[in-house]
Image: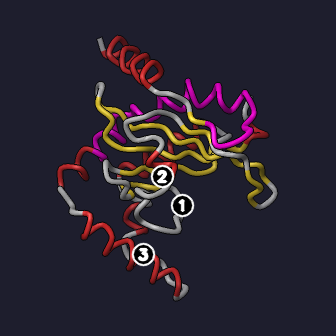
Amino acid sequence: MRKVAFFSALVFVLMSSAVAFAGPAPQKVIDLANSQLAALGMDAEVVKAVNAQNAEGKTMKEIKKIDNRWIDDQGTGGTPALMPGLMSNDCAKQLYNLMEQNAFITEIFVTDNQGANVCQTGPTSDYWQGDEDKFTKVFNKGVLVADPKDDEGKTISQVSVPVVDGQTHVGTMTIGVDVDLVP
């Protein structure tokens, strides 16, 4: 029964999500985004964490206050106080597992329904992603495959997919993909 529910949810995501292309990503990355990576947005541990954060009911004012502190801490060379927790919670542990299972994944971060970080495997420049394409073009819309960029000698394309609970988009997941390692 779980396999049927998972398959149904995957079909829903693929059928209801229009792919938005920010640039010339290789076809193999686009294909991966629409299949295997879209399915990661239905991971039970990730969905559970996103739903829990959504239930907290943070206001945008609270989120932006955290975001400003996050950015200020990095500006002074420090680590945002909240970041270590977001990199070690149960959701982050699951993200590390997903990375171990997929050698082409370089990073993952997950947001709630307002674009605030829920969990992550590496530092992000800000806490609130809600004003960026990786959130605005993905939440309630579909999959986004960004232009590949050089990152320390690797060609990385960020792929953003909806986090889906049943047929409801509850957040987003952004996945760094090493283009050269995609089979």
| Marked residue nearer the N-terminal end (1 or 3) | 3
| Residue 40 place in picture, x, y as percent | 47, 33
Q: Please provide the residue range marked out in magenta.
A: 21-50
| Residue 115 place in picture, x, y as percent | 37, 54
Most frequent secondary structure within the magenta stretch = helix
Helix, strand or loop at label 3? It is helix
Is 178 located above or below residue 6 in the figure? below
Helix, strand or loop at label 1? It is loop
Give the foreground label among 2 and 1: 2
- Amino acid on which the number 2 mark rests in the picture: Phe
| Marked residue nearer the N-terminal end (3 or 2) | 3
The CA distance from mark 3 to mark 2 is: 15 Å
Circles 2 and 1, Cβ within 8 Å, touching? The answer is yes
Residue occupying image coordinates x 55% and y 27%: 36
Give the foreground label among 1 and 3: 3
- Amino acid on which the number 1 mark rests in the picture: Gly
Q: Which residue is mark 2?
A: 109
Helix, strand or loop at label 2? It is strand
Q: Classify mark 1: residues with Cα within 10 Å, few (<14), some (14-19) or many (20+).
A: some
Circles 3 and 2, Cβ within 8 Å, touching? The answer is no
User: In the visual, does 36 lie left or right of 157?
Assistant: left
Residue occupying image coordinates x 55% and y 39%: 144
Q: Which residue is mark 3?
A: 70
The CA distance from mark 1 to mark 3 is: 14 Å
Q: Which mark is residue 122?
A: 1
Location of residue 85 by image quarter: bottom left
Residue occupying image coordinates x 70% and y 46%: 147
User: In the visual, does 169 lie left or right of 143?
Assistant: left
| Residue 183 place in picture, x, y as percent | 74, 28
Question: How are the residues colored?
Answer: secondary structure
Q: Classify mark 2: residues with Cα within 10 Å, few (<14), some (14-19) or many (20+).
A: many
